[in-house]
Image (cartoon, helix red, strand yellow):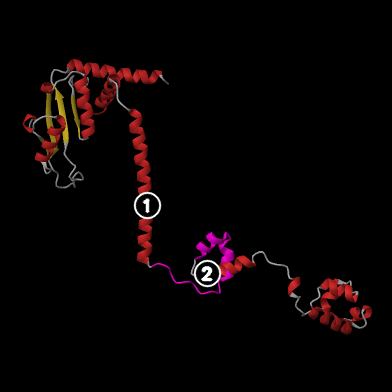
Amino acid sequence: MTELNSKYTDFEGLRQQAVALRREGLSLRQIRDRLKIFNNEILSLLVQGEPPPEWTKRPNAKDDLRAKARELRLRGLTYDQIELELGCSKSSISLWVRDLPKPEPRYTEEELRDRMNAGLARVRAAQDEERQETKRLAREEVGTLTDRELFLAGVALYWAEGSKDKTYRRTEVLQFINSDPNVIKIYLRWLKLLGVTRERMRLRVSIHETADIPGAEAFWADLAGVDVAALQKTTLKKHNPKTKRKNTADTYRGCLIIYVTKSADLYRRMEGAWYGIVLGAESTA
């Protein structure tokens, strides 16, 4: 204070004046100009302990956000909800409202679980709708098949699912087995295109011995357009008690085996056409 007194001999008098001016609502700049005190350090000492007037305080841009955050918290909103509402960080929200009581949960655990399940159901329904729409558009894009397209589709289908001739076992005959009704429909339509009559077909059901055998026989006979009596004796698959069957639903009807008599020439045409498809696909590369 010695140094200050040497320059400002009446420091206490200046301080009294500065405090009075401060309490009147003057800013530091106004006090400086009024008392001709141009040393900022001394000016600060003269008004030390006196709060600045409200009008000199710089407004805080976050004051409104803070007030709104506290209001929302008191209304029971979570940090995440307040963050979404105001667009500010969760860390700021925590600082602003941490002195406020934690709101009671809006939902019980059971209600939360029900809401979650309902949300999942809506998502899955939307996903299923999208899948079905994709399938519908693809189905409509195919349109009506020409005889050539059906022939090629039948060849590929047979090569994937039908019995094939082997070098170690000559079986040049059309024999096809499948459990998918639509696959069987396409195959029967393909045989009709090749001129195969129903009289040349031998139809037989292959099914697990514990399944609904009469129901399966009636189903496949109806799909093939024949009487149940026209089917050959059903082949029964034995059940291993150590294994658990998975195909126990009501839609399980086993497989239908379709054997075509006197079909060696048709088999050779089919195999030749298959390799024609292979070569044709390679040529487009």
Quadrant for residue 246, please give it.
Answer: top left
Residue 71 rendering spot, x and y as whole percentages: 55, 70
Work out which quarter of the rendered image holds the C terminus and state it.
Answer: top left
Structural crowding at the residue carrying mark 2, measured as other residues with C-alpha within 10 Å and reported as few (<14), some (14–19) or many (≥20): many
Magenta segment boundaries in residue numbering = 78-107
Residue 90 rendering spot, x and y as whole percentages: 56, 63
Residue 248 rendering spot, x and y as whole percentages: 18, 45
| 54 or 257: nearer the viewer | 54
| 39 or 146: nearer the viewer | 146
Instruction: Please report the residue visible at 32 percent of the width from the left and 17 percent of the height from the top.
Output: 276
Inspect the image, locate mark 2, and give the three-letter code of the amino acid beneath it: Arg
Instruction: Please report the residue visible at 90 percent of the width from the left and 79 percent of the height from the top.
Output: 4
Q: Is residue 52 left or right of residue 158?
A: right
Q: Is residue 58 visible?
A: yes
The disc label shown at residue 41, or none? none
- Is 104 included in the stretch rendered in magenta? yes
Label 1 sits on residue: 122
Q: Is 225 above or below relative to 76?
A: above
Q: Secondary structure at mark 1?
A: helix
Inspect the image, locate mark 1, and give the three-letter code of the amino acid beneath it: Arg
Q: Is 18 above or below relative to 207?
A: below
The disc label shown at residue 73, or none? 2
Structural crowding at the residue carrying mark 1, measured as other residues with C-alpha within 10 Å and reported as few (<14), some (14–19) or many (≥20): few
